[in-house]
Image (cartoon, rainbow, N blue to C red):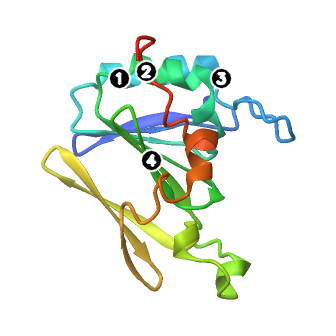
Amino acid sequence: TNTYYNFTYKGCHFVCLNSMDEHDYYPPRTPGLSQRQLDWAAKEIMARRDARWTFIFLHKPIDIMSDRYLEFERRIAGCEYTVFCGDWHNHCTAVRNGKKLFMLGTTGGGDTLVAQGQRGVHFGEFDHITWVSMCGDKPEFLNLALDGLHDEDVVTTSKITWLTAKYFRANKPLSEEE
């Protein structure tokens, strides 16, 4: 059986990918999304391109750095979508090729440095829930922290620059001409 799936709810398409599909747990980390899974996802997304919005979920962000994932993005470029991932425990929002990518921070897992008051929101480290609401045909995002509310861009790649090139490849264009 597949360990990745999709469904439609209230006109929105949800695609849940398994970033452990071909994952090497130890360095060097290899991309975990198999080509078979990406081909399946692209086919499913394109078949529902008339969805109000598509939300793509995966655990590890390491795959969104790969050339294989960039090719996947090229295949679905005509669709409206947002990507959510986690694992690194630093919340950060990026925009790549006009699409939002969210790396969620600790969502209840806790962080000892935050608990000791040594780090926090400015490092993208805070316990939160990311709330998504569809307003017409566009999503709006809000971070519900245990100690208050934060806007969607509470931490961006312009604020934590080491995330930009390393994890989001925000400078990687979809078309070869760019």
Q: Are marks 1 and 2 in contact (CB under 8 Å)?
A: yes
Q: Position of residue 34 (x, y in %)?
A: 65, 23
Quarter of the image containing the C terminus? top left
Which residue is depicted at the point 60% across and 29% down? 2
The residue that disc 3 covers is 34
The residue that disc 1 covers is 77
Q: Sequence order check: which comes first, mark 1 or mark 4?
A: 1
Mark in front: 2 vs 3:
2
Q: Label 1 vs label 4: CA separation?
A: 16 Å
- For mark 1, give the secondary structure: loop
Q: In the rendering, which numbered label is found on residue 174?
A: 2
Q: Sequence order check: which comes first, mark 2 or mark 3?
A: 3
Residue type (three-letter) at the residue carrying disc 2: Leu
| Residue 174 visible here | yes
Quarter of the image containing the N terminus? top right
- For mark 4, give the secondary structure: strand
Q: Which of 125 and 84 is in front in this view?
A: 125
Q: Sequence order check: which comes first, mark 1 or mark 2?
A: 1
Q: Are marks 1 and 4 in contact (CB under 8 Å)?
A: no
Q: How crowded is mark 2: few (under 14 residues within 10 Å), some or many (20 or more)?
A: some
The residue that disc 4 covers is 94
Residue type (three-letter) at the residue carrying disc 1: Ala
Q: Label 2 vs label 4: CA separation?
A: 15 Å
Q: How crowded is mark 1: few (under 14 residues within 10 Å), some or many (20 or more)?
A: some
Q: Sequence order check: which comes first, mark 3 or mark 1?
A: 3
Q: Position of residue 155 (x, y in %)?
A: 47, 62
- The part of the image, by quadrant, that contains residue 129 is bottom left
Q: Sequence order check: which comes first, mark 2 or mark 4?
A: 4
Q: Label 1 vs label 2: CA separation?
A: 8 Å
Which residue is depicted at the point 59% across and 61% down? 90
